[in-house]
Image: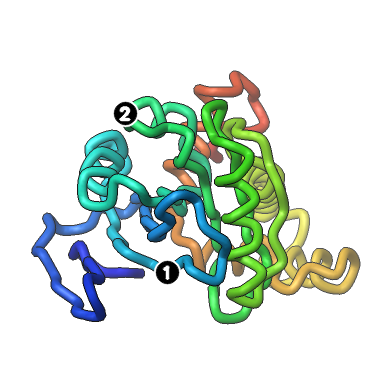
């Protein structure tokens, strides 16, 4: 995590501004310096911040105010990029860049296009991801995007299977690792991500998609 602070990079100098304590379900917004939407060779991180999800709109405005010509990328795993972009004066520069835990190991980055995202902004984010050594995918803004929407269904069903006594937690995880080539089982992944985060995303997707598959286990 980036910690409870805003860090701005200005002429090579880092300055930290105190922020309120982080909540479990939060977003990270990174503003990349991109005056005139230059090539990726001239792109550098200019502002990084983590915010409670309820403050996403305020976070976007704050980041945009600090760097009016920046590309604003949020690391949220499920919240609407389009709604976040609505809070900005330059919504065409807003998109999602969803990194995966553990970030130093996982290659995937979801580049999520809001309804307002300019094609140049998405192209820049895709290229920036590759420069970071990641393998990005191009996703349209939708609740849970591609990864969280699929991954959460598997994770919730794994919990239900464990509750029903279908198999041990270890064997459920082993089934997905050995049978489907997943690098980590769904229950172990849930432990890594955090039950609080999983529950918050499940509740959000249950409401947004109105689908019983995202109903959190009762126990």
Given contact means CB atoms under 8 Å apart, are the residues at marks 2 and 1 in contact? no
| Rendered image: mark on residue 4 | none
User: Which residue is drawn at the image coordinates 65% and 51% (left, top)?
Assistant: 123
Crowding near the residue tagged with mark 1, few <14, some 14–19, many ≥20 C-alpha atoms within 10 Å: some
Task: Please tell me which residue lies in front, 57 or 32.
Answer: 32
| CA separation in Å, label 2 and label 1 | 23 Å
User: Which residue is drawn at the image coordinates 45% and 49% (left, top)?
Assistant: 36
Q: List x then y, in percent, for residue 204.
A: 47, 32
Q: Which residue lies furthest to the top in this view?
A: 210
Task: Please tell me which residue lies in front, 186 or 87.
Answer: 87
Screen quadrant of the N terminus: bottom left
Q: Which residue is the site of mark 2?
A: 87
Position of residue 115 relative to residue 117, above or below, is above
Label whose residue precedes the other's in the sequence (2 or 1): 1
Task: Please tell me which residue lies in front, 209 or 74.
Answer: 74
Q: List x then y, in percent, for residue 16.
A: 14, 70
Colour approach in the figure: rainbow
Q: Which residue is the site of mark 1?
A: 44
Q: List x then y, in percent, for residue 58.
A: 22, 37
Q: List x then y, in percent, for residue 99.
A: 55, 62
């Amino acid at each position: 995590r980036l910690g409870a602070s805003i860090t701005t990079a200005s002429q090579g100098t880092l300055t930290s501004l105190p922020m309120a304590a982080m909540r479990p379900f939060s977003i990270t917004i990174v503003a990349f310096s991109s005056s005139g939407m230059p090539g990726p060779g001239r792109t550098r991180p200019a502002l990084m911040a983590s915010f409670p999800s309820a403050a996403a709109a305020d976070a976007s405005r704050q980041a945009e105010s600090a760097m009016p010509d920046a590309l604003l990328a949020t690391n949220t795993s499920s919240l609407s990029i389009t709604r976040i972009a609505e809070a900005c004066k330059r919504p065409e520069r807003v998109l999602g860049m969803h990194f995966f835990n553990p970030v130093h190991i996982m290659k995937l980055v979801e580049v999520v296009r809001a309804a307002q995202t300019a094609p140049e902004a998405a192209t820049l984010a895709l290229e920036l991801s590759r420069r970071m050594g990641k393998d990005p995918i191009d996703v349209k803004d939708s609740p849970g995007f591609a990864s969280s929407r699929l991954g959460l269904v598997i994770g919730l069903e794994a919990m239900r299977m464990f509750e029903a006594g279908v198999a041990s937690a270890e064997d459920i995880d082993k089934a997905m690792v050995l049978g489907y080539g997943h690098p980590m089982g769904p229950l172990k992944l849930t432990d890594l991500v955090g039950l609080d985060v999983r529950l918050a995303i499940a509740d959000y997707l249950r409401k947004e998609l109105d689908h019983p598959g995202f109903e959190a286990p009762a126990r």
